[in-house]
């Protein structure tokens, strides 16, 4: 479902592309360009947070994320381990 919506966003924004996959790729590329243009950090590590400090804070961050009322609107409740994995991914960023 989400991939279709991303493709639709690419189309609505006029980014072109013949296939849904191409429209998604163009959307993601444009977002990458925008983040680069505004010098947005691509990971929590790039903000200067030391890995040791992040790992110390992680249990509290996971608890806070799990307790956040907005989490209740998700289609399914994540496990605490899944939230920790998501936060670790945010810390590391994605490979380019």
Image (tube, helix red, strand yellow):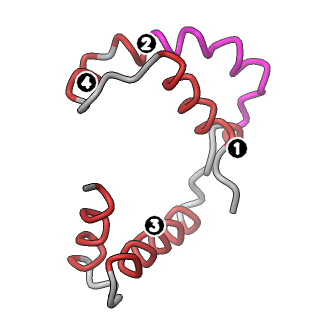
Please, what secondary structure does the residue beneath circle 1 have?
Answer: helix
Please, what secondary structure does the residue beneath circle 4 have?
Answer: helix
Q: CA distance from mark 2 to mark 1?
A: 22 Å
Who's the residue at 70% across and 11% down the image? Answer: 56
Question: Residue 24: which quarter of the image?
Answer: bottom left
Work out whether mark 2 precedes mark 4 in sequence or the reverse, and give the earlier one: 2
Work out whether mark 2 precedes mark 3 in sequence or the reverse, and give the earlier one: 3
Q: Are marks 4 and 1 in contact (CB under 8 Å)?
A: no
Which residue bears the numbered disc 3? 31
Q: Is residue 62 magenta?
A: yes
Work out whether mark 4 precedes mark 1 in sequence or the reverse, and give the earlier one: 1
- With respect to residue 73, does 57 lie above or below? above
Mark 2 crowd level (few <14, some 14–19, many ≥20, 10 Å Cα): few
Q: Is residue 15 magenta?
A: no
Please, what secondary structure does the residue beneath circle 3 have?
Answer: helix
Q: Nearer the viewer, mark 4 or mark 1?
A: 4
């Amino acid at each position: 479902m989400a991939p279709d919506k991303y493709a639709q966003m690419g189309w609505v924004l006029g980014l072109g592309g013949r296939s849904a996959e191409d429209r998604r790729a163009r959307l993601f590329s444009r977002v990458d360009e925008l983040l680069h243009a505004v010098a947005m950090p691509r990971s929590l590590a790039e903000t200067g947070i030391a890995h040791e400090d992040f790992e110390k804070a992680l249990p509290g961050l996971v608890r806070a994320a799990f307790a956040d009322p907005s989490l209740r609107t998700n289609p399914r409740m994540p496990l605490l381990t899944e939230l920790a994995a998501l936060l670790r991914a945010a810390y590391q960023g994605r490979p380019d």
